[in-house]
Amino acid sequence: MPYDNFASNSLHLASSSLLAQSAADFPSLIAWWKLIPVLIVLIVWTRLLTWIDKDTQKALLPRHAINAGMLVALAAAVAFFFILPGFGVAFGVFFAIALASVGTYLGIRAQKMGLGDLQSELISGLKSLIPGGKGGEKKIREVAGEVVLISSSGQHLEQPADEDAWRVAYDTLQAMIAEPILKGATTIDILATGAASGSKYLIDGVAYDGPAVERSAAGDAVSYVKSMCALDLEDRRKPQAGKCKIMVAGKRLEVRVNTSGSRDGEIARLEIDVPSRYQFRPENIGFTADQLDRLTASRDEPGLVLLAAPRGAGLTTLQYAMVRLHDAFTSHILTVERDPPIELEGITQNKLTAAAPPAEEAKTVAWVASQEPDVLMAGGLETPQAARSLIELAQTGKRVYVGVRASDAFEALEVWKKLVGDANLATAQLRTVIAGRLFRRLCDATKVAYQPDEKLLRQLGFGPGQVAELYRPHVGPLVDARGQEVPDTFCFGIGYRGRFGVYEIFNIDDDVRHAARVGQPQLYKQLFRKQKGRYIQELVLARVAAGDTSVQEFLRVLKPTAEAPKTPANA
């Protein structure tokens, strides 16, 4: 049986058997309406089998074996339907086999590459089963290797004609942004400046170079972006900001655009789908189960909590996740932020510009604290007056979160002391310091297992026999079971897909306060160990051993500041 016709042949075989059998005088099928639910299940089942047949190739799974198994399940379901007595029992078994077959495939796929990429496919597939399920929307033409560009007014911008003045600009822009966006870029810089004309983009916090183009073509691309956002094309110096949209694989994404220029040229920065970066809660940013239990148990306790991460390592995500520990509809929650990237539902955000002077910061924080919120979160503070206003609020029994830039919990404590200017005051209401880093997650579909060198394992703190194998990103083209090259639609040759956080939590007890007040930060790590705390390095090495990330990623993120753990990674 040709596999390309697998689902249609299966449906024909099953439906023919059912109809033929109903024509024979089977008492349980004399009522014609009993065929209706069976045929509905068959239609949905065979549509799913069509999808499974295609998806096995995408997921690099054994297509022939899985299709054969699905066919056996279908035949068994039909057989049981006629063998078992009573329509209710027969249909129940028939339906259960259908669910079990599809569920088994999803389980196999989850082990191989996960199910995170199926959400949009599932929604589209379900809509296709419903008449009019597309909602009557006009179909937008998508071209392979391109993204659909949508202006700020909602107009879909097709490729201009050859003689159109915008044609070069459109083609250059597509060449600069299509591949990065398809790969999951969060930021794209289009550079029309001197010899460096071209583009740069970020994927999971790592920078990549886009294609180099002539400066005039890059300038045209910047102008096209400005036109999409209805910005002033003539003004190439003054910073401008606007919004537009793109569509990738049927999904619309908001693009925030900022342009600026100088005598050397013009730059456009595209921020892709910004809201999706900050929709996380504590349970899905990387905290361990015991850490989550501790955070949940202490969330209603008054006092001040420091949140720390280096620049670009997820501090804003951590801040927003922590305020989401609290119910925004039963608690009065306020924030003070410099240029917040998104609006938080149910939370009043008080905004400071990036260039707000010290006096404005101090005044704003003092005013917000005077509103006596149940929870207040502030980040990027620069003045002792603002810090002291937060301490005074914590003294009244409120919960206060403060974000600072630091590489670990111990540095964060020293940064906070310096900002406040008084060690006694800085630590009096301080309850906890939470410091984190972000690490790229290995692509589950393409990662490669290997046996690590024993010397490397010892250097990383693993004992004999603790780790049998580690994983690294795949290098080179992907091949299927027959050795034929297949396109990498999982991580597009990067080897990683997405990031997760790793966090160390330092409780500020009387011993820690004393060490801070007498100026002995060298005691912090000893006291941290007394609390049975685990360093970021140790926690991420446990994720390395679990295959979530690689040794290379561990070294990339932590090598400048990492110290060799003194205990095994899984201690």
Image (spheres, rainbow, N blue to C red):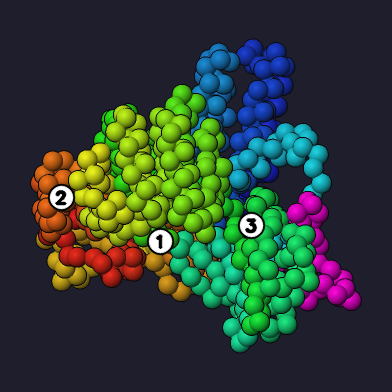
The answer to if 173 sits in the magenta stretch is: yes
- Within the magenta stretch, is there residue 478? no
Mark 2 surroundings within 10 Å by alpha-carbon count, few (fewer than 14), some (14 through 19), many (20 or more): some
Q: Residue at x 45, y 63 (%)?
A: 205
Residue 401, percent from left and from top: 36, 42
Give residue 311's mark.
1
User: Disc 2 designates what residue?
Assistant: 517
**Image location of residue 385, percent across then percent down:** 37, 48
Please give the range of residues in magenta. 150-176
Q: Amino acid at mark 2?
A: Arg
Name above or below for residue 91 compared with residue 547: above
Q: Which tag, 1 or 3, sits closer to the chain's start?
A: 3
Residue 105: in sight, yes or no? no
Q: Amino acid at mark 3?
A: Arg
Of callouts 2 and 3, which one flags the residue occurring earlier in the amino acid sequence? 3
Q: Secondary structure at mark 1?
A: loop
Q: Where's residue 449, x and y in %?
A: 32, 63
Q: Which corner quadrant of the image does residue 178 belong to? A: bottom right
Mark 3 lies on residue: 256
Q: Residue at x 29, y 33 (%)?
A: 395
How many angstroms separate mark 1 from mark 3 (CA)? 21 Å
